[in-house]
Amino acid sequence: MLTTKMIISRGLMTNDRQRARIKPNLGGYRVIDFEYAAPTELDEAIRKLAAAGDSGRVLAGGTDIIVQLREGLRSADLVVDVKKIPGLTQLELSGEQGLHLGASVSCRQIYDDQNIAAAYPGLADAVRIIGGWQIQNRASVGGNLCNSSPAADAIPPLIAYGAQAQIAGPNGQRVVPVEEFCTGPGRNILQQGELLVALTLPSQPSGAGSAYQRFIPRNEMDIAVAGAASWVHMDKTGERIEQARIALSAVAPTPVFAAEASEWLQGQVASEEVFAEAGELAKRVATPIDDMRGTAEYRTHLVGVLTKRTLATACERARK
Amino acid sequence: MKTHVTTTINRATVEFLCQPRQSLLEVLRDELSLTGCKEGCNNGNCGACTVMLDGLPVDSCLVLAVEAEGAVIETVEGIAKQGHLHPLQQCFLEGAALQCGICTPGFLVTAKALLEKNPQPSEQEIRFGLAGNLCRCTGYDKIVRAVQATSKASPES
């Protein structure tokens, strides 16, 4: 029931909001009107996005795009909610096929599935530290990739697993390795009308292990100063590394695959010295900037430390 | 053009009209007078706007109201039943686990969900679970102790 006092207080609040919106510099608000569609078929989503051209935006968890629309960093005439399209909501682990990770599957769905978290521990590490619980209940790994932040936590593990991005658009489907997906801060290879349908991660043989770590000055809820993911496949003795893949975040315009360090690890016997040497090699692909989160020098140092630590954890997990 | 949305809020069927650009937080507060959920940062950092959406805590500032079609929502207003405070609310009250109070509704919604998922959390689990809620008065210790007190008083202990 509304009382006079409530009506007055609500009226004042509405006026405050309107004032804030007229002065975006003061309130951070802008009136943004757009149309909303929640198609249940992939074809319909592609048609709508293609028709909207560069003013169409995809909405999965919304934790980046809603803020960007509100703050005027991106604009939209049409927002297409993809959470009702079957292929995009599918999360399925199979022994032979690996992991089908629909583009709109939330972080929480991944770590809540014990089989998936056990099979892909590096991915589980990342989705457990993206935002807080409220964010993890909405934010998707697909959205983390499409937002294409250089500091994205979920992208390095995807690259380390050799994940493939399944893309659909007006001209059909295509598959792109995740390390080729991002092209710059906030930019990627998606063309108008295209959307990410799913990520596919190869099935994990016994002897495989992975880990992701980032450095932040707080305990939680922060953006990586630098991050590293390592994936290893060890021989039956658990001593020699047969294959390795290392990927880094927040040290280049996009998350990067550290090819040289990864190749050098092939055939090496796992040890602290070997992990440290791989860390030194990984530093070569780091081209960080100085900003409020850290200096380029510090970030490069962190690449060495985080590569070493994630390799050690990945090898330990591989032996279990 | 306004969209018609049907939801269940605090166990009652609620229908509302909204613009696609309106967040669930805006509609809860401005259209439905559920002003318990607060607007702090409006960008997903502070958790003052936390509500339960289909059984999971979410930042209502990061959900479009149109996305709530068919959803089951619980706000802080739905936590007390038949005029009786929930044990968590009672523990917040008795432990003075608030200073200015703006963050309290968000903390209550998240902490209640945390205790339902994990009735006997460790201090670290409580702090990790509540990481998405910020208290600008920095009264975290009393908040954590109130959650611990609720967990100790629950029948599972």
Image: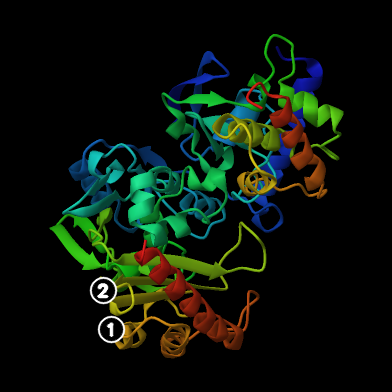
Which image quarter: residue A89?
A: top left
Out of A33 and A174, give the one closest to the viewer.
A174
Local crowd at mark 2 within 10 Å, few (<14), some, or many (≥20)?
some
Please give the name of the residue rendered at 46% of the width and 30% of the height, measured from the top-left corner.
B68
Indicate the position of residue B7 as horizontal and vertical percent values. 47, 21
Decide if residue A299 is on the left or right side of residue A113: right
Decide if residue B118 is on the left or right side of residue B66: right
Outermost residue on the front side: it is: A237
Please give the name of the residue rendered at 31% of the width and 79% of the height, measured from the top-left corner.
A240
| Amino acid identity at mark 2 | Asp
Decide if residue B92 is on the left or right side of residue B1: right
Outermost residue on the top side: it is: B82
Q: Mark 2 vs mark 1: same chain?
A: yes
Please give the name of the residue rendered at 67% of the width and 37% of the height, measured from the top-left corner.
B106
Q: Secondary structure at mark 1?
A: loop
| Amino acid identity at mark 1 | Gln
Local crowd at mark 1 within 10 Å, few (<14), some, or many (≥20)?
some
**The C terminus of chain B sits in image quarter:** top right
Q: Which mark is residue A283?
A: none
Up the image or down, B150 lies above or below A271; here it is above
Indicate the position of residue A132 as horizontal and vertical percent values. 57, 49
Up the image or down, B64 lies above or below A76; here it is above
Q: State the count of labels.
A: 2
Q: Which mark is residue A266?
A: 1
Which image quarter: residue A176?
A: bottom left
User: Is any part of residue B62 visible from this angle?
Assistant: yes
Out of A243 and B31, give the one closest to the viewer.
A243
Q: Which mark is residue A235?
A: 2
Indicate the position of residue A304 as horizontal and vertical percent values. 50, 84
